[in-house]
Image (cartoon, rainbow, N blue to C red):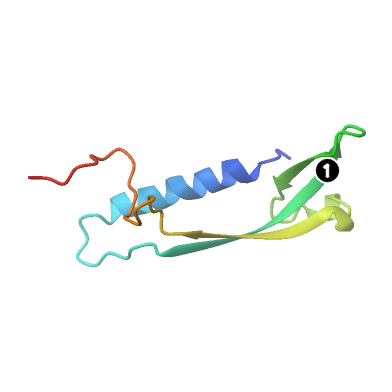
Amino acid sequence: MAELGLVEVIEKVREELRAAALAGADADIRFPVEQVTLEFQVGIKKIGEGTGKVKIWVIETGATGKIEHDKVQKVTVVLGTPTGPDGELKVSGGSDSAPG
């Protein structure tokens, strides 16, 4: 079983949302993403002695039986609309200036 970190999983969700937005860009009805709520079961493992470091990874569906129950936690991540410091919608790869 490969251990996927939260960073990799959230990046994959970002890629899927970007692909969905592009796929619907020319549709008559478009649905803006205002909020995404992700819920994960994660495994927690202490790394080394005395370092205080822990490793957290997302558990695959059906894999919880292989991990001690007390080392499995639920994590909920709520992602809002991406905005910049000025409150405007932030889109990467675009121009900072208005057209015209």
- List the residue tagged with mark 1: 45
Residue located at (89% from left, 53% from top): 68
Examine the rendered structure and indicate whether residue 34 appears above or below residue 17: below
Q: Residues within 10 Å of mark 1 (few under 14, many from 20)?
A: few
Examine the rendered structure and indicate whether residue 53 appears above or below residue 44: above
Residue located at (24% from left, 67% from top): 29
Q: Residue furthest left?
A: 100
Examine the rendered structure and indicate whether residue 90 appears above or below residue 94: below
* Spot occupied by residue 34 in the image (x, y as percentages of width and height): 40, 64
* Spot occupied by residue 11 in the image (x, y as percentages of width and height): 51, 43
Say which amino acid is labelled 1: Lys
Quarter of the picture holding the N terminus: top right
Please indicate whether residue 43 sits to the left or right of residue 82 in the image. Answer: right
Please indicate whether residue 97 sits to the left or right of residue 6 in the image. Answer: left
Please indicate whether residue 34 sits to the left or right of residue 28 in the image. Answer: right
Query: What kind of element bears circle 1?
Result: strand
Residue located at (37% from left, 48% from top): 19
Please indicate whether residue 26 sits to the left or right of residue 37 in the image. Answer: left
* Spot occupied by residue 87 in the image (x, y as percentages of width and height): 35, 57
Quarter of the picture holding the C terminus: top left
